[in-house]
Image (cartoon, coloured by chain):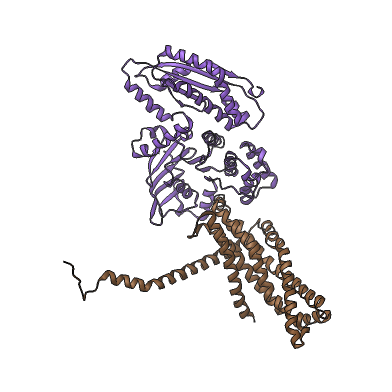
Chain colours: A purple, B brown
């Protein structure tokens, strides 16, 4: 594998007699989204503060592109750190400055750019982060989500190669949490930076992460892909992941991807060979149009509303659901064969056309910040599964059977 | 059966007794070491900040701070100096008339103001008005991670936040002290000449005859010393508000502000004595 962009070798940090980081070893690779997970107070933010140079390790070394920081010249360290940007957990916005001034400050103070060029860059970032209406507002006048976007705009204004996000979704409701994570994923792809995220949002962060680092008891106990983490056998699974995922279920009504798989396996085990079950896949088509016209918050409110409506309907007959991709919800009907499932889906379609699609729009409209209107379509497809079949292949089969079950045209006019 | 062992030293008791005897010295020692550490740290803080005054992009920040620390303190300085001068005129007239020396009222008012009251009261008034605000502002920026944010943006907080404030204080203190002296002499004129009937020519002539250039320069040297003390103490207290052991968060900012004002006022008076004894 390539030389890691950032590497910790036996990094230890103590505060008084308390050891927070205990011989931590980790690798972060260029161009990836790496998420550090762990319980509160485990020392996740400390790792970020070591990376950005706000703290120095008591023992061990930090390597940047394979070279220990301790062996670098001052100018080399400055050059390395100049490529980084940090988004604080509580945003750390300058409260006596306007949105414009907050974003412009790094350019004004660290570059020799002319005012016209600074104006151009700042206004471009303001537009990209949907803050055009708040240029002259102070941070205290902005909503939580807007403050996060402002912090992100400020972090990205110097075109950093590495962006560190310290619990970017803390204190946000489930809809906003998803919106912020999507925003990070979107900008990471758009600006191609290396993202290092500290988060509790399991499993939501899995969707945007290439690698997960698990911090437990002062040590990095796992480094790998989200898929590898699912097979990771360690007390971390029970103490951290399961408890956080339980919270996720309470907050969103939908099971996490991992819990969904566990439930499915549990149901399969109970059945005898030959017992059937059905899977339905629902897709919200036009999500990108919602994002473009109404913003991320509205898009996430829409998909959230769709998930809740599906869960309400299928939960009553013993079904369980999860969000699969950004615009897909998968539901397992464990006691229904394909014929039952078709009848259930027909009933659902009637209800959905009457009320469900309006719920989706109502969810999106609560977050509406512009007068634009959008079209979107909901597709549904079902497939029968057998205990020997892999759930993923059943899902793919259900997806290939999808038909339109509802459409909303230019809803703003309604 | 219970019994007592006599004639044998108990090592634990011995150690405890020694510890009790040494404890006061240990406490005094740690307090003194703490103060020396803080003094060293504050001196470094001052010099590093002053060094950054001459970096590019500092002028606009210094001008902004000059307006905040200097220009916006003008009204309060004028008001305090006017009444200080009037009281001095009144008191000195009351005392000197008993010896038939009321002609020296002008000298007494002017010298008291120029050598002593002008620099000291100006410094105390600016501490109360701007020093406390500086400490609170920096303290809040510290606890809300705004200073950490500056670090992460590669903006040196000493250059960006502290240096303009200290420089502006060094520039504005002597100017405000001079203003204080002039208005104070005017206040003495109002009470001595206009209200108590002293001769106008005598008042001004005694000032002209007895106030030397050295009196003025000594007063201005004091104001410079006070500027450095007030600006450093107030900035330092706010900047390190997060390291206070007695409190955290908003309370730490409140206590840092109180400490800034109290320490500044005490140091103004202490340094006043030291500087006077060196200059006299």
Seen in the picture, residue A205 relative to B127 is either above or below; the reply is above
In the image, taking residue A56 as reference, residue B230 lies left or right, namely right
**In the picture provided, is A400 more to the left or to the right than A229?**
right
Measured along the vertical axis of the image, is residue A286 above or below residue B13?
above
Q: Is residue B121 above or below residue A288?
A: below
Which part of the image, by quadrant, shows the C terminus of chain A?
top right
Residue located farthest toward the top when viewing the structure as drawn: A339
Q: Residue furthest front?
A: B1
Compared to residue B86, the image places residue A198 above or below, namely above
Which residue occupies the foreground of this view, A258 or A50?
A: A258
Residue A392: % across, % down: 41, 22
| Relative image position of residue B59 (x, y in whole percent) | 68, 58
Please state the horizontal and vertical placement of residue A5, each as a whole percent of the image: 46, 43
The foreground one among A125 and A380 is A380
Among the 4 quarters of the image, the one containing residue B9: bottom left
Q: Is residue A269 left or right of residue B134?
A: left
Q: Is residue B212 visible?
A: no
The N terminus of chain A lies in quadrant: top left
Residue at image position (29%, 72%) is B14
Residue A310 at x, y percent in the picture:
49, 22
């Amino acid at each position: 594998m390539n030389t890691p962009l950032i590497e910790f070798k036996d990094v230890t940090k103590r505060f008084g007699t308390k050891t927070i980081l205990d011989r931590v070893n980790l690798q972060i690779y260029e161009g990836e989204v790496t998420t550090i997970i762990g319980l509160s107070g485990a020392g996740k933010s400390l790792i970020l503060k070591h990376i950005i140079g706000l703290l120095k390790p008591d023992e061990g070394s930090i390597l940047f592109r394979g070279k220990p920081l301790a062996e670098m010249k001052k100018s080399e360290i400055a050059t390395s750190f100049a490529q980084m940007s940090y988004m604080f957990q509580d945003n750390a916005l300058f409260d006596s400055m306007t949105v414009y001034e907050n974003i412009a400050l790094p350019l004004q103070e660290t570059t020799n750019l002319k005012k016209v060029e600074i104006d151009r860059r700042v206004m471009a970032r303001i537009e990209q982060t949907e803050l055009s209406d708040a240029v002259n507002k102070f941070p205290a006048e902005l909503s939580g989500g807007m403050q996060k976007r402002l912090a992100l705009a400020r972090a990205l204004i110097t075109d950093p190669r590495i962006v560190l996000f310290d619990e970017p979704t803390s204190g946000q409701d489930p809809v906003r949490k998803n919106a912020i994570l999507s925003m990070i994923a979107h900008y990471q792809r758009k600006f191609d930076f290396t993202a290092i995220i500290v988060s509790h949002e399991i499993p939501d962060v899995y969707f945007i992460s290439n690698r997960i680092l698990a911090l437990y008891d002062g040590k990095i106990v796992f480094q790998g892909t989200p898929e590898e983490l699912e097979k990771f056998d360690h007390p971390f699974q029970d103490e951290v992941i399961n408890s956080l995922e339980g919270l996720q279920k309470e907050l969103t009504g939908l099971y996490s991807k991992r819990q969904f798989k566990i439930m499915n396996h549990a149901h399969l085990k109970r059945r005898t060979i030959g017992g059937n079950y059905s899977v339905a896949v629902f897709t919200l088509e036009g999500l990108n149009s919602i994002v473009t016209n109404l913003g991320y918050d509205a898009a996430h409110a829409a998909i959230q509303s769709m998930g809740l409506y599906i869960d309400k309907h299928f939960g009553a007959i013993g079904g369980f659901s999860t969000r699969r991709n950004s615009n897909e919800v998968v539901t397992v009907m464990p006691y229904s064969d394909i014929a039952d499932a078709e009848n259930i889906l027909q009933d659902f379609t009637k209800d959905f056309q009457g009320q469900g699609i309006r719920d989706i729009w109502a969810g999106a409209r609560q977050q509406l910040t512009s007068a634009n209107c959008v079209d979107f379509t909901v597709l549904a497809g079902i497939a029968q599964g057998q205990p020997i079949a892999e759930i993923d292949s059943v899902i793919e089969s259900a997806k290939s059977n999808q038909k339109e079950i509802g459409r909303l045209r230019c809803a703003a006019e309604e | 059966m219970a019994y007592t062992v006599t004639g044998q030293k108990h090592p634990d008791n011995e150690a405890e007794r020694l510890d009790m005897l040494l404890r006061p010295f240990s406490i005094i020692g740690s307090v003194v070491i703490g103060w020396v550490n803080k003094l060293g740290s504050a001196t470094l803080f001052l010099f590093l900040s002053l060094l950054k005054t001459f970096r590019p992009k500092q002028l606009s920040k210094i001008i902004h701070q000059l307006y905040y620390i200097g220009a916006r303190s003008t009204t309060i300085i004028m008001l305090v100096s006017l009444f200080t001068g009037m009281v001095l005129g009144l008191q000195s007239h009351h005392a000197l008339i008993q010896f038939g020396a009321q002609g020296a009222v002008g000298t007494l008012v002017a010298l008291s103001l120029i050598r002593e009251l002008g620099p000291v009261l100006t410094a105390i008034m600016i501490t109360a008005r701007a020093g406390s605000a500086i400490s609170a502002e920096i303290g809040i920026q510290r606890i809300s991670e705004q200073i950490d944010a500056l670090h992460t943006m590669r903006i040196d907080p000493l250059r960006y936040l502290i240096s303009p404030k200290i420089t502006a204080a060094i520039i504005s203190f002597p100017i405000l002290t001079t203003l204080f002296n002039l208005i104070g002499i005017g206040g003495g004129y109002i009470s001595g000449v206009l209200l108590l009937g002293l001769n106008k020519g005598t008042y001004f002539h005694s000032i002209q005859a007895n106030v030397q250039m050295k009196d003025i320069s000594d007063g201005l040297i004091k104001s410079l010393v006070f500027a450095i003390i007030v600006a450093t103490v107030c900035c330092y207290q706010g900047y390190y508000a997060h390291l206070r052991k007695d409190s955290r968060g908003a309370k730490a900012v409140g206590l840092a502000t109180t400490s800034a004002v109290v320490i500044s006022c005490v140091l103004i008076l202490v340094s006043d004595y030291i500087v006077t004894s060196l200059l006299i």
